[in-house]
Image (cartoon, grey):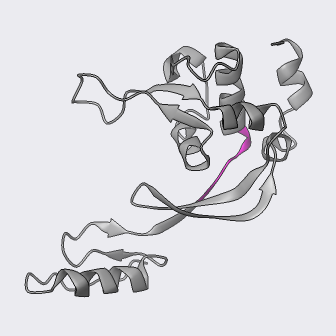
């Protein structure tokens, strides 16, 4: 349950920041704007990992090649795809002119993402995020096979693809 704070137009910015810094892990309503401020712990899961592998395969591991998320043919895992940014595994092409959309939806795998997919890199299990910004990593380091879990076979997913 979120901590409710008093909305106070006379509160100083320092007072508001102190309240936020003391309570963002549990979550609270901002005393200035009434927005939710909460730290979320995110992790990479199997369907997300499959989506990253598809991006890797679609681009032949080229970090300069951008792909729209819809072109990957994902049936699931796409909703959390953008969270790979918190580990530095993908990056987004900036929006050009469509101001109605929150993001461009066009992504490229990073060199770090290629290393993760090809099992040359392990990443921290968790990314801690507050208001869409990475604040910390934690947990043991994992590789792509760890996050694929028992439901997906890395060898099978990668077997029909070669770089």
Looking at the image, residue 143 sits to the left or right of residue 10; the answer is: right
Which residue shows up at 54% across the image and 43% down it? 85
Which residue is rendered at x = 64% and y = 18% of the image? 62
Q: Residue at x 39, y 60 (%)?
A: 131
**Count of labels in the image:** 0
Image quarter in which the C terminus is found: top right
Q: In x, y percent, where is residue 141? A: 79, 57
In magenta stretch: residue 160: no
Please say if 87 is above or below 16: above
- Quadrant occupied by the N terminus: bottom left
User: Residue 69: percent from the left, percent from the top?
Assistant: 51, 23
Q: Is residue 88 above or below residue 14?
A: above
Q: Is residue 117 above or below residue 130?
A: above
Q: Residue 116 location, x and y as percent?
A: 76, 38
Left or right, 10 with reference to 47 = left
Is 76 or 96 nearer to us in this picture?
96
Dividing the picture into quadrants, the one containing residue 162 is: top right
Q: Residue at x 83, y 23 (%)?
A: 157
Q: Name the side, left or right, on which 125 lies relative to 127.
A: right
Q: Quadrant of residue 143?
A: top right
* Magenta-colored span: 42-47
Is residue 33 placed above or below 121 in the rendered structure?
Answer: below
Front one among 137 and 145: 137
- Is 30 positioned to the left or the right of 2 in the image? left
């Amino acid at each position: 349950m979120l901590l409710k704070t008093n909305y106070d137009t006379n509160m100083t910015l320092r007072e508001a920041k102190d309240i936020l810094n003391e309570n963002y892990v549990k979550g609270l309503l901002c005393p200035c704007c009434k927005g939710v401020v909460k730290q979320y712990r995110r992790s990479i899961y199997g369907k997300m990992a499959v989506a990253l592998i598809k991006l890797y395969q679609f681009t032949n591991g080229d970090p300069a090649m951008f792909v729209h998320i819809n072109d990957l043919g994902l049936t699931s895992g796409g909703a959390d795809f953008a969270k790979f940014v918190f580990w530095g595994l993908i990056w987004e092409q900036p929006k050009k002119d469509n101001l109605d959309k929150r993001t461009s939806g066009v992504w490229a795998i990073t060199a770090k993402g290629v290393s993760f997919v090809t099992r040359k890199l392990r990443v921290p299990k968790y990314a801690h995020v507050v208001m869409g910004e990475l604040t910390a990593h934690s947990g043991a380091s994992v590789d792509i096979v760890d996050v694929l879990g028992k439901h997906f076979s890395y060898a099978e997913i990668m077997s029909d693809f070669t770089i």
